[in-house]
Structures are given as C-alpha cells and as structure tokens.
Image (cartoon, rainbow, N blue to C red):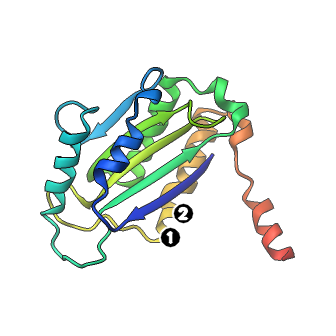
Amino acid sequence: MIIKSKSYKTECYKGILQYLLRESEQEQGFVISRFLKGDNRDVNALTRQFIVNETYRKHVRSNSVKLYMDIISYKAEDAKLLTNEKLIKIAKKYIALRSPKSLSLATVHRNEKSHTHLHFVFSGTHYRTGIANRISREDFKNKVKLPMEAFQRTHFPELKASEINHQRTLSAKKKR
C-alpha cells in the first residue's frame, strides 16, 4: 500500500470532485462521506458544502490549503482480493486517522489503471470550526501511514504484494 497526499491552495473543489465521482468508476464502486449532507454523487451540492465550510476559516491567508486529496494505492496482484467490503473498512479507518474532524469523501477507482486505489478528499479546515486541517510530515508518517500499514497487516494479511518494506527503502537511500 502506498499512501500519497496532495494539497491544493486554489478553490478547485468542483474539478477534483468531478474527477473522483466520474461515471466510469461508479459501477463497481462506493462513496463514503463525513459531515457532507445530501446526495454523495451530486458534485455541485458537494462543492457548495466545501466552499461554505471554508468560510469558517479563522486565519485567512492567500496561500491557505483549501483541499487535500489523498490516495491509497494497491499493487495489481492484490486487486482480486480487494472487495468493496474490505475497501470500505480501509477507507473508514483512514478517514478516522487522517482527518476525523473535516469534511471528507472517499471513493474507489478500479478502472483507471491496472491497480485498485482509494481516493480521499478532505477540506482544508475542520468542519464548521475554521481550524486548519494541517498535518506535519512527521505526524502524517507516525499517526497515519504507519498505523494504516499496521491496520492492513492485522486485518488483511492476504494483501502481501502491497506491503511496504521500509528497511529496503532506507538502505537504497543510503547507497546513493
């Protein structure tokens, strides 16, 4: 499992949500949301909710992060083992670890590439409080990535191909 996070400093809510909720991925997929009201597939309604939540921001800056998009990617060999039931459990756990107090949306993409991956969108601020949803790299590693890997190993040990060997990565960097 590889976890990536990207931040957006412009109000690109609609474009990101359209990408996540496109027709080609809806047939075998699901949508999970937190603090979002109404139809989870109505891009315009979801966009409005993200914009309204941003108005609560306490410290307004020109370069504030408006939106985070995270991806959990699995190797192609594990695709047949990844049922929606398993992916929903993984998505709920990730949301709880990454940003339990912000607007969030999660969906699965199976058709885009040869491997299954989960997409997440988080608002730049916590729900209706205006507190920034920032997480440091160190906290992201220790409070999100490593616990997610432990969760996967414990609950889904059959996903062997997608396990990450951190020792191998560290030794490769040392050789350079």
Location of residue 61 in the rendering, given as x and y in whole percent from the top left corner: 23, 79
Q: Image quadrant for the C terminus?
A: bottom right
Position of residue 76 relative to residue 104, above or below, is above
Along the line of sight, the residue nearer the viewer: 29 or 132 = 29
**Image quadrant in which the N terminus is located:** top right
Task: Tell me what residue is drawn at x 18 percent, y 40 percent.
Answer: 45
Q: Do callouts 2 and 1 mark residues in contact (Cβ within 8 Å)?
A: yes
Q: Nearer the viewer, residue 151 or 125?
A: 125
Mark 1, secondary structure of its residue: helix
Residue appearing at x 54%, y 63% in the figure: 141
C-alpha separation, residue under disc 2 versus residue under disc 1? 6 Å
Which of the 4 quarters of the picture holds residue 130? Answer: bottom left
Residue 92 shows in this picture? no
State which quadrant residue 57 falls in. Answer: bottom left
For residue 110, what is the image quadrant? top right
Please, what is the three-letter code of the amino acid marked with disc 2? Lys
Residue highlighted by disc 1: 137
Specify few, some or many for label 2: CA neighbours under 10 Å numbering under 14, 14-19, or 20 or more. Answer: some
- Where is residue 12 drawn, in percent x and y? 31, 57
- Which residue is under mark 2? 141
Query: Where does the image place residue 142, in percent across and percent down from the top left?
Result: 53, 63
Which residue corresponds to the image point at 52% horizontal and 28% vertical from the top-left? 86
Instruction: Tell me, yes or no, if residue 39 can be seen here.
Output: yes
130, 114: nearer the viewer: 114
